[in-house]
């Protein structure tokens, strides 16, 4: 801004002649137009950087509070104490499902809070379930004893990760309601108060129907959208490809097609070999799915 004293406009000394009067009028019109332009620009900026983000965040919260929340994919495993654990066994409880690892610093920070939540809400129908993504069980056992973990922990494997949409960062934590539906997903270290608020809200429901009023504390951030894997693709004879519409004879024929194509990821394997040896390979998955579309097209 110019700090020089402002000059009064339209107050010249002596009478204002016709030329001066027209100049003053022109100036006022120009000044008014400039104010209008600045006002529109200002409103645009306010809408873009203030109102719009708030509205979008509110819309995301409304979507999160809507219906049709996905059911948590079922899985079974053996916990660190050798007991069989199935997610379906906990139906009717509120579940905090934590994907973590001993080498993950933020995971270590969160776990003492989970121990306290387990103590505080166990009798009200709450349970923490840990899924360790460590490569071996030994460090998990040591860590479990060291922190006095008081809830079941199982060793994760590829299928469980895929069922839950692929675990791209640790920790990743899901909150599951009494009705078996996933209500929130949190990636990265999260304050225990956030989990506690969501848990208390879901504990207050009877689980007979979906809780339409639930909103994820803090809103849904990028990457926290709940997107699950398709069991028909995960458990397929060709991992990542849904073969449910093919007959056994067609599956065998389709395998020959993929075994005749080379994967472009640099593995020097056929597409079929790559799908079996590297389930995470996006290249062989893409090629296999493209080939399936062609395979299922009716002959011309």
Image (cartoon, rainbow, N blue to C red):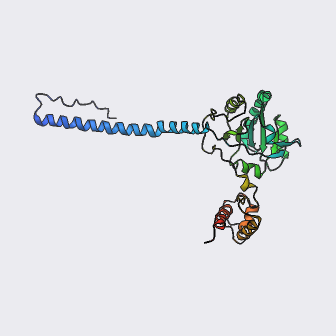
What x and y, as percent, mark residue 243? Answer: 72, 60
Q: In percent of the image, x 72 and y 33: which residue is there?
A: 208
The structure residue drawn at horizontal position 72% and vertical position 36%, both measured from the top left corner, is: 179
In this rendering, the answer to whether 232 lies above or below 113 is below
Q: Is residue 31 left or right of residue 196?
A: left
- Is the C terminus in the top left, top right, bottom left or bottom right quadrant? bottom right
Tell me residue 252's x, y (percent): 76, 68
Front position in the image: 291 or 209: 209
64 and 219: which one is in front? 64
Residue name at image x 73 percent, y 55 percent: 232
| Observer able to see residue 79 | no
Residue 55 visible? The answer is yes
Q: Position of residue 261 (x, y in %)?
A: 69, 71
- Examine the image and state in which quarter residue 222 appears: top right
Q: Height in image: 190 above or below 277? A: above
Residue 274, image quadrant:
bottom right
Front position in the image: 266 or 151:
151
The percent coordinates of residue 74 (x first, y second) are 77, 45
Name the residue nearer the viewer: 203 or 199: 203
């Amino acid at each position: 801004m110019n700090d020089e004293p402002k000059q009064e406009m339209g107050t010249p000394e002596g009478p204002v002649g016709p030329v001066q009067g027209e100049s003053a009028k022109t100036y006022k019109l120009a000044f008014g137009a400039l104010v209008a332009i600045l006002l529109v620009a200002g409103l645009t900026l306010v809408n873009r950087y203030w109102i719009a983000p708030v509205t979008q965040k509110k819309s995301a919260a409304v979507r999160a509070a809507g219906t049709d929340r996905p059911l948590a994919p079922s899985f079974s495993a053996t916990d660190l104490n050798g007991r069989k654990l199935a997610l379906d066994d906990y139906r009717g409880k509120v579940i905090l499902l934590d994907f973590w690892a001993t080498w993950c610093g933020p995971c270590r920070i969160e776990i003492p809070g989970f121990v306290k939540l387990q103590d505080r809400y166990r009798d009200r129908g709450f349970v923490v379930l840990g899924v360790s993504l460590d490569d071996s069980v030994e460090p998990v056992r040591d860590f479990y004893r060291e922190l006095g973990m008081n809830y079941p922990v199982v060793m994760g494997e590829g299928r469980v990760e895929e069922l839950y949409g692929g675990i791209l960062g640790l920790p990743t934590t899901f909150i599951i309601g009494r009705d078996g539906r996933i209500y929130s997903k949190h990636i990265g270290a999260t304050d225990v108060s956030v989990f506690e608020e969501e848990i208390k809200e879901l504990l207050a429901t009877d689980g007979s129907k979906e809780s339409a009023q639930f909103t994820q504390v803090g809103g849904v951030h990028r990457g926290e959208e709940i997107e699950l894997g398709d069991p028909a693709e995960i458990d397929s004879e060709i991992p990542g490809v849904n073969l449910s519409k093919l007959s056994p004879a067609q599956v065998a024929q389709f395998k020959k097609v993929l075994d005749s194509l080379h994967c472009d990821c640099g593995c020097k394997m056929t597409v079929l070999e790559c799908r079996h040896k590297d389930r995470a390979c996006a290249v062989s998955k893409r090629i296999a799915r493209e080939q399936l579309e062609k395979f299922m097209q009716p002959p011309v």
